[in-house]
């Protein structure tokens, strides 16, 4: 009996953001010598060919100095992601209410990444009380509900998000992708497909949306729909490796079952 082939891995977004690096520095000499920890921040951008380019940030969070290339192994071993650091550039221009929203979201993100979803939910709710349409707060609280398996609450948040055009803008792409994948993995394939369908209305030329729709369709048991979106993906980008692997997987799966 033929074993079922393994589906391809999902497409990966390129790395782009602020990372930190800690260094121990020795101050003083003799009996007065002491060690202190210094944190330096860097802008990391992934370019063509999986090349990572690193540039230091100054005290104003502006890139300065030479750019250097590092490997993914170096990034994992020597740097820590700082998703909230980039907010420092715009904090001064925020109103008091906007500042409170940003702070609540930052705390919510921190607790959610620690796995403390109830505390994270509390912080996201603070932000939503001030701005119900805040995209990042909606994504955050929705992910908390999905993580806890609270489908009805997750569906309520999903209903808000699909009405917000801003939820599908590039600046929210990381959360957008995480939310869609979480919906699919939580068994909420109908919501995941509606989610990607809405995104395609706003970005019909995004081949990765077709690819993600194909994965959701297959999980729902609709291989024909999956194949249609893979063809659309490859029409937009004939070199999309994951889509080509997915097409091959569907072909082998069909032969194994037939």
Image: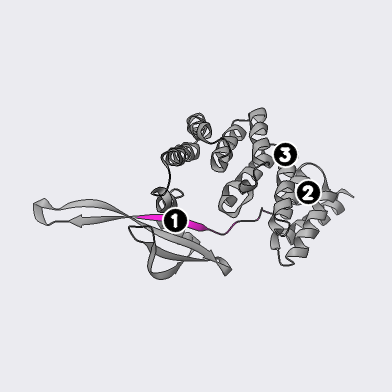
Residue 31 drawn above or below residue 238: above
- Mark nearest the camera among 2 and 1 is 1
Q: Which mark is residue 191?
A: 3
Q: Considering the numbered disc 2 on the image, is that residue within a helix, a strand or a loop? A: loop
Part of the protein shown in magenta: 9-21
Residue 93 relative to residue 29: left or right: right
Q: Is residue 20 magenta?
A: yes
Q: Nearer the viewer, mark 2 or mark 3?
A: 3
Per the model, the C-alpha gap separating discs 1 and 3 is 32 Å
Residue 67 position (above or below residue 77): below
Quick one: SS at disc 3?
helix
Residue nearer the viewer, 131 or 172: 131
Q: Considering depth in this image, is 148 or 250 the residue closer to the camera? A: 148
**Could you say which disc has been placed on residue 30 in the image?**
none
- Which label sits on residue 18? 1
Outermost residue toward the right in this view: 258
Q: From where the camera sits, is residue 248 visible?
A: no
- Compared across the picture, whether 204 is left or right of 32 comes to right
């Amino acid at each position: 009996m033929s074993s079922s082939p393994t589906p391809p891995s999902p497409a990966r977004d390129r790395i782009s953001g602020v990372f930190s690096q800690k260094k121990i520095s020795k101050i003083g000499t003799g009996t007065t010598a002491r060690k202190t920890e210094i944190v330096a921040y860097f802008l990391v951008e992934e370019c063509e060919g999986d090349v990572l380019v690193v540039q230091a940030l100054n005290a104003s969070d502006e890139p300065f100095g030479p750019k250097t290339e590092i490997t993914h192994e170096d990034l994992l071993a020597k740097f820590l992601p700082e998703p909230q650091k980039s907010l420092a550039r715009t904090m001064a221009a925020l109103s008091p209410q906007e500042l409170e929203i940003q702070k609540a979201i930052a705390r919510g993100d921190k607790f959610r990444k620690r796995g403390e979803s109830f505390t994270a939910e509390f912080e996201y709710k603070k932000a939503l009380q001030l701005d119900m349409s805040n995209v990042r707060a909606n994504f955050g609280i929705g992910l908390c509900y999905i993580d806890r398996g609270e489908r009805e609450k997750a569906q309520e948040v999903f209903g808000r998000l699909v009405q917000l055009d801003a939820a599908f803008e590039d600046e929210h792409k990381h959360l957008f992708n995480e939310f869609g994948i979480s919906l699919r993995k939580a068994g909420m394939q109908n919501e995941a497909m509606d989610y990607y369908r809405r995104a395609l209305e706003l970005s019909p030329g995004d081949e990765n949306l077709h690819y993600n729709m194909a994965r959701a369709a297959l999980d729902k048991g609709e291989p024909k729909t999956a194949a249609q979106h893979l063809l659309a993906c490859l029409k937009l980008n004939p070199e999309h490796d994951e889509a080509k692997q997915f097409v091959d997987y569907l072909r082998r799966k069909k032969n194994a079952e037939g």
